[in-house]
Amino acid sequence: MRFFVFILFFLTTSLRSQSLQETEAKGTGMTKSDALQDALRNAVSQAAGVSIMSETKVENYLIVSDAISSNTKGYIQSYEVIKETPFPDRFEVILKAKVTTETVKADFQLLARQIGGMRFLVMPDPKETNEANLATLQIVSNKINDALSTKGCRYIERDRFNSLKKEAIALMESSKSDKLSYAQQLGMLSDAQFILTVSDLQKTSQPGAFDISKGDIYSFNVKVMDNCTGEGLGSLSFANMQASKNTEDAIGKAVNEKFEKLFGTITSYIGSWLNNGTPYELRFYQTGTYRDFRDLRKKLKEDASFGGEMEITSVLNYTKLNCTFKKQADDLADKLLDLADEIPTFKEQKLDVKHIFGRQISMAPQKYIIPNLPSKSLDTNQTSIQH
């Protein structure tokens, strides 16, 4: 009997040790707290690198692994700070941490399925009309695309973007009439889940000896938007620290200076999906009353897989409801169909899923065809969707 107890203890201990990765990591920050969080992120990143080494063929691998690293609370079992070093301009922390790698692997696979096929659209601000500024902002866009490519991310090529502009303008009354709608139209046409717009370009010449210019310093802003839900993720200011006489070189240095922080904004947002559920925008065309949508919202709140504020909003020719969901888009579509059949009006209209674009799902009565739908549709008489 003691022998079997020993074997059971041995196996349990062995499995537990296999799911824990001990790492030593260093973190830096403006404060001790910032340095500690940076060290914890680096510890998770190291452990993730070991535990998901076999997953390197996953599309958007670096985005997923960075998103995992930003979500330290679920993975750090314990840690010990072994060195703290204050500097005049920063703080450094070195620690040892135990990371639960089985959870890391499970979350990695979940996020990989949720964001597979992700694309980025980087574009000059649609409100910019100055041709010289537009040319320079296009250089900024190209440099950001180059940086995205180093992360293994897919982005929209300039030639493809230019051809899409004509199609988007045809769908809009004016390309300048609604900045957000125009950008989102382009994003949907290009199957881009995230849009980065560059704006507020400034050029300052730095004088040197005998009034001979040392070169130019460029500054600009980059705004990030989740195209599937229309949610803004914030903006970041860029500038090259030293003057340069070469425009592309100056802008390249400005992008490199802040790109990791920009990329971190996106990956941190994606990492939050693990705790809160993935954000989705649900669109309902030509169907239902407020009472119907209130009933639907009540049913969503009763299901533990759903979360978020779930505000009901009327937008142009559809009703919108944003929510979070802890599974994939196909699972959400199936769930919506089941719930729609429990609401008399929706069931009578035979509400159906018409369109799935990333994390945006459009529904309408079966016989209704959504006009000017700019991306792939589920209607049989329109282009079939490709997952």
Image (spheres, helix red, strand yellow):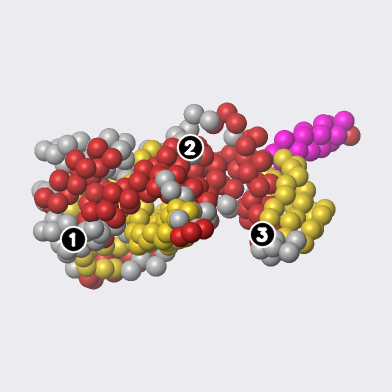
Residue labelled with disc 2: 150
State the residue at coordinates (32%, 50%).
136
* 364 lies left or right of 224: left
Of all residues, the one furthest to the front in this rendering is 210
Q: Is mark 2 on a helix, strand or loop?
A: helix
Dot label at residue 176: 1
* 60 lies left or right of 123: right
Residue kind at label 2, given as amino acid type? Thr
State the residue at coordinates (62%, 40%).
48
Determine if the magenta segment contains residue 157. no
* 169 lies left or right of 343: left
Work out whether 184 lies above or below 110.
below
State the residue at coordinates (74%, 56%).
92
Residue 166 location, x and y as percent?
15, 46
Prevailing SS of the magenta stretch: helix
Residue labelled with disc 3: 29
Residue 231 location, x and y as percent?
36, 61
Number of numbered labels in the structure image: 3
**Residue 201 seen from this side:** yes
Q: Earlier in the sequence, mark 3 or mark 2?
A: 3
Q: Earlier in the sequence, mark 3 or mark 1?
A: 3
Q: In which quarter of the image is the N terminus?
A: top right
Q: How far apart are marks 2 and 1 (CA)?
A: 33 Å
Of all residues, the one furthest to the right in this rendering is 2
Q: Look at the numbered discs 3 and 2 and tell me whether their residues touch, using CB distance below 8 Å.
A: no
Crowding near the residue tagged with mark 2, few <14, some 14–19, many ≥20 C-alpha atoms within 10 Å: few
Q: Is mark 3 on a helix, strand or loop?
A: strand
Q: Where does the magenta region start and end?
A: 3-20
